[in-house]
Image (tube, rainbow, N blue to C red):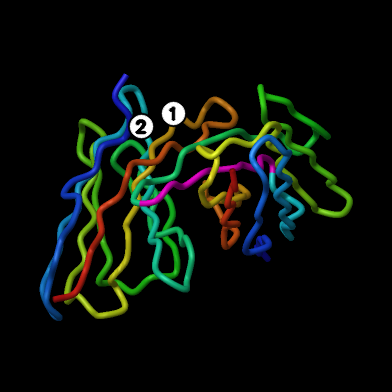
């Protein structure tokens, strides 16, 4: 069974540009999560999507946005890229929430860097 | 509030046991998790424990939970060089949000 897949592996942007990161969840999973792993700041929760709806959002500026498609894949958009946005962005997926404890399974991440 | 803390570094000899400790603050956490991150990779789910349990064993891994002290530990028996990685504990907060500790870097020496 394929795990969570993310693309691209690496992305280099200049300040002010827009970046789009993609994530495909494990087959059968309906929830997708995004986390940022920045040097010195650790792993921080960004967004949670389930059944196409945004369910929760972390403490990030509005230039971070995303969406979930009908096939449960997801996009994370970073608009007006800033130096402090350089980080590893991890996507995770989990099963349906009506069942207790759906552990989050992670992909290998997209490393977003500034040029 | 949510805050998860771990020690930064652990050095262990191959074949010995490793114990990684974690403290958390959110008493409403229902599940607590351990993840492993190898260089250049994402997070691999190792194991988890429900908050009404004291202990869970899964092959070489043993998780101990002291809910009164909000203390979680992961013991790795017979530690191997392939166990060298960063280990993160995490608690599940409201809104399905995982709050992670800063990670413990484990170095296994031959």
The structure residue drawn at horizontal position 44% and vertical position 28%, both measured from the top left corner, is A96
Split into 4 quadrants, where in the image is the N terminus of chain A? top left
The structure residue drawn at horizontal position 66% and vertical position 60%, both measured from the top left corner, is B4
Q: Are marks 1 and 2 in contact (CB under 8 Å)?
A: yes
| Residue closest to the far top | A1
Q: Residues within 10 Å of mark 1 (few under 14, many from 20)?
A: many
Task: Read off the chain for label 1.
Answer: A
**Is residue B75 shown in magenta?**
no
Q: Quadrant of residue A50?
A: top left
SS assignment at label 1: loop
Against B39, residue A15 (above or below) is below
Specify the segment rendered in magenta: B30-39
Q: Nearer the viewer, residue A30 or B42?
A: B42
Dots 1 and 2 on the same chain: yes
Query: Residue B67: image x %, image y %?
Result: 83, 46
The structure residue drawn at horizontal position 20% and vertical position 47%, both measured from the top left corner, is A22
| Residue closest to the far right | B68
Split into 4 quadrants, where in the image is the C terminus of chain A? bottom left
Which label is found at residue A30? Answer: 2
Query: Residue A87: image x %, image y %?
Result: 32, 66
Q: Which of the marked residues, 1 or 2, is nearer the chain's N terminus?
A: 2
Against B77, residue A47 (above or below) is below
For the residues labelled 1 and 2, the Cα–Cα distance comes to 6 Å
The residue identified by callout 1 is: A95
């Amino acid at each position: 069974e394929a795990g969570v897949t993310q693309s691209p592996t690496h992305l280099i942007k200049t300040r002010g540009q827009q970046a789009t990161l993609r994530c495909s969840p494990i087959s059968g999973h309906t929830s997708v999560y995004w986390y940022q792993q920045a040097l010195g700041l650790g792993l921080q929760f960004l967004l949670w999507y389930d059944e196409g709806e945004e369910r929760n959002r972390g403490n990030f500026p509005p230039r971070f946005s995303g969406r979930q498609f009908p096939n449960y894949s997801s996009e994370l958009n970073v608009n007006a890229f800033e130096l402090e946005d350089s980080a590893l962005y991890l996507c995770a997926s989990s099963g349906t929430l009506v069942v207790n404890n759906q552990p989050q399974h992670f992909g290998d991440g997209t490393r977003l860097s500034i040029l | 509030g949510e805050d998860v803390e771990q020690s930064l570094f652990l050095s262990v000899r191959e074949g010995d046991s490793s114990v990684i400790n974690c403290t958390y603050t959110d008493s409403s956490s229902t599940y607590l998790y351990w993840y492993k991150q190898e260089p250049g990779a994402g997070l691999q789910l190792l194991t988890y424990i429900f908050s009404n349990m004291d202990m869970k064993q899964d092959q070489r891994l043993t998780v101990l939970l002291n809910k009164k002290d909000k203390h979680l530990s992961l013991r790795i028996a017979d530690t191997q060089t392939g166990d060298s990685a960063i280990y993160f504990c995490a608690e599940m907060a409201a809104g399905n949000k995982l709050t992670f500790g800063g990670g413990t870097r484990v170095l296994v020496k031959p």
